[in-house]
Amino acid sequence: MKITFFSTQPYDKDFFNRHNKDFGFSFEFLETGLDEKTVELVKKSVAVCVFVNDKVNRAVIERLAAAGVKIIALRCAGFNNVDLAAAKENGIRVCRVPAYSPEAVAEHAVAMILTLNRKTHKAYNRVREQNFSLNGLLGFDLHGKTVGVIGTGNIGRAFCKIMLGFGCKVLAFDLIANKDLEAHGVTYLPLLEVIASSDIISLHSPLNDQTQNLVNAETIGHMKTGAMLINTSRGGLVDTKAVIEGLKSGKLGYVGIDVYEQEEKLFFRDLSSGIIQDDVISRLISFPNVLITAHQGFFTNEALRQIAEVTLSNIDGILKSQKIEMANSLV
């Protein structure tokens, strides 16, 4: 049974090969992403394994079905890049990994907050140049600050509990309030109230029609002056041009992003010897109060192990006509 992997990095090969001994699949690893041009590379595969920036639209799915592919396995939680209706119409099962180490992403969001606040990245570079001055490194206590959490799924819940541990007041918005979080002291409020009341806002929502550009010029206008915005979820939640205007005006005091609207052209690649053609992210990089990481939040040993194990278990279960976890199955 052959699985073709797209958007493959060296660590993907390492972890999937390491955890294949219990399954015995045949792997084909491709560095290129999946789209309407590269779908032709799939030959004699029962499944394709894709990541966040692969394009799995109707045209791609129809050609996968014609090639005999039975399963589209997402090695991630988000599935906004897959046309689920087209997959169902073409008899292709779709599965994902909904809860790989939510702590990994939550902890990365906290790391971004601390880095922006205490400017540890700047301090590190200064000391390496024998500059021990503290001027320009002034931060603030997290203890006692109000943190707004947009989305309290697995990652949002983990993030809330960490921030409660810092002694923060935690506000949250979601369609359904989590009773356990409320018992721990999290207060659920309408979206605009959370945004208007928070010193720090962290996004942990899926990307869909309702959440596209959730952070825009209007919602930024409701924020406290100098607020910190953190996005470790999906780039499309944020209107990046509106964020740039918010930074220029001083309305946004800090921005940390691990995801970006147009990241498929940039992230997971070494572009250090070339010229970045994306003027929007180039402008973002120029701000001293902006921190950008390249979709790194998931990147821990624990998360990669779970991604490999769950992805292969999903495929194996579907092929053997066994039930897989309901949250793992999309079609």
Image (tube, rainbow, N blue to C red):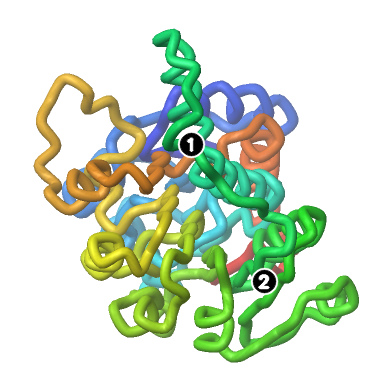
Q: Position of residue 227 (x, y in %)?
A: 47, 66
Please determine whether, in this image, residue 57 is positioned above or below residue 313: below
Give the residue at mark 1.
137
Mark identifier at residue 152: 2
- Quadrant of residue 153 in the image? bottom right
Q: Residue at x 28, y 36 (%)?
A: 32
- Number of residues whose C-alpha sits closer than 10 Å to that of mark 1, classed few (under 14), some (14–19) or many (20 or more): few
Please tell me whether mark 2 sits on a helix, a strand or a loop.
loop
The foreground one among 330 and 100 is 100
Amino acid type, label 2: Thr
Q: Is residue 71 visible?
A: no
- Number of residues whose C-alpha sits closer than 10 Å to that of mark 2, classed few (under 14), some (14–19) or many (20 or more): many
Q: Position of residue 223 (x, y in %)?
A: 44, 77
Mark 2 or 1: the one toward you? 1
Q: Earlier in the sequence, mark 2 or mark 1?
A: 1
Amino acid type, label 1: Leu
Q: Position of residue 34 (x, y in %)?
A: 30, 47
The foreground one among 245 and 158 is 245
